[in-house]
Amino acid sequence: MNLQSTTTLNNGVKMPRVGLGVYKMEEGSDVKEAVLSAIDIGYRSIDTASFYKNEEGVGQAIKETSVPREELFVTTKVWNDEQGYEETLAAFDRSMEKLGLEYLDLYLIHWPVPGKYKDTWKALEKLYKDGKVKAIGVSNFLEHHLEDLLEDAVIKPVVDQVELHPRLAEPALRDFCTQRDIKVEAWSPLARGKYFDDEVLQNLAEKYGKTPAQIILRWDVQHGIITIPKSTKSHRQKENADIFDFELTSEEMKQIDELNTGERNGPHPDEFDYNT
Ligand SMILES: NC(=O)c1ccc[n+]([C@@H]2O[C@H](COP(=O)([O-])OP(=O)(O)OC[C@H]3O[C@@H](n4cnc5c(N)ncnc54)[C@H](OP(=O)(O)O)[C@@H]3O)[C@@H](O)[C@H]2O)c1
């Protein structure tokens, strides 16, 4: 396996197992340079969202790189106040205009806005059937949201992108998704560095001559979790990609699994303030 290794989604589309998250990267040259740096290192998957307000810079990087479009995998998401059938179709057009792309690889519902996400899903199904997006999925969906969506969905989501790191390992949600052939994708996989001083991670880092960030990302990959660490810095992008020359034993995987306390750093999807 390497940085360009892919996993096959339930519709046959191949998605890189490791990608670059761009949340909080500034629109314009900051995000453009960070994406160009990542592509140069070998990243092929970029995760943005209309909410991040940096789709233009992402698009600019895609335009400027010599890596062909079809070798890249671009994800964006429809934000909460853009949800609903017609609204989502319009939001998609706005995102595509900013990205400057002919097609998108993956379009996600950013959060399960109550009363809206089913209509939003219908719009995603239309975009998929029209060939404008290669795959459609969801984010921040719990089991009950997925169950509800699957009741009327014609097309199954390919991924559920959720907050996931050793302290929030989501074993039940992962099992639920595995049984339905939905891939789990980790957002904030590094928990923004919050647990790097954990003893288990420190000991494994020392054993393998790696950093706690690399141990966590390797744990993701070995669990089959798609992961999208964010860094604006080339040296950290390189570090986060350098996880393919060692393997955690099953005992070590278990030690990391046991760090799970269910602690969230982001909002709980059922408690999110959907009115703001
Ligand atoms: N669907 C959703 O609701 C949702 C929510 C949040 C995030 N996301 C996606 O998930 C991506 C990743 O999550 P995230 O950005 O929240 O957090 P993250 O990837 O867990 O952590 C990023 C933070 O850690 C730092 N960092 C990165 N690599 C490091 C390393 N090797 N050593 C030390 N520090 C390191 C970064 O700083 P520097 O940049 O300064 O290196 C940044 O402050 C986002 O960018 C976004 O694409 C999705």
Image (cartoon, helix red, strand yellow):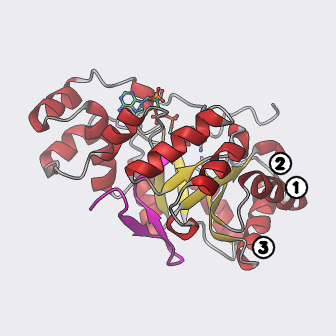
Q: Earlier in the sequence, mark 1 or mark 2?
A: 2
Q: Residue furthest top?
A: 197
* Quadrant position of the C terminus in the picture: top right
Q: CA distance from mark 1 to mark 2?
A: 5 Å
Q: Nearer the viewer, residue 159 or 48?
A: 48
Q: In the drawing, what numbered circle is on residue 126? A: 3
Q: Kindly check if marks 1 and 2 are in contact, taking CB atoms under 8 A apart as contact.
A: yes
Q: Residue at x 35, y 64 (%)?
A: 5
Q: Point out residue 212 in the picture as x, y percentages from the top left corner.
A: 26, 31
Q: Residue at x 65, y 31 (%)?
A: 26
Locate residue 87 relative to residue 21 in the image: left or right. right
In the rendered image of this protein, does residue 137 appear above or below residue 253? below
Q: Is residue 8 magenta?
A: yes
In the rendered image of this protein, does residue 183 appear above or below residue 128? above
Residue 234: image quadrant is top left
Q: In the drawing, what numbered circle is on residue 82? A: 2
Looking at the rendering, the stretch of residues picked out in magenta corresponds to 1-23
Q: In the drawing, what numbered circle is on residue 87? A: 1
Q: Residue at x 52, y 39 (%)?
A: 34
Q: Amino acid at mark 2?
A: Glu
Mark 1, ligand 1, within 8 Å: the answer is: no
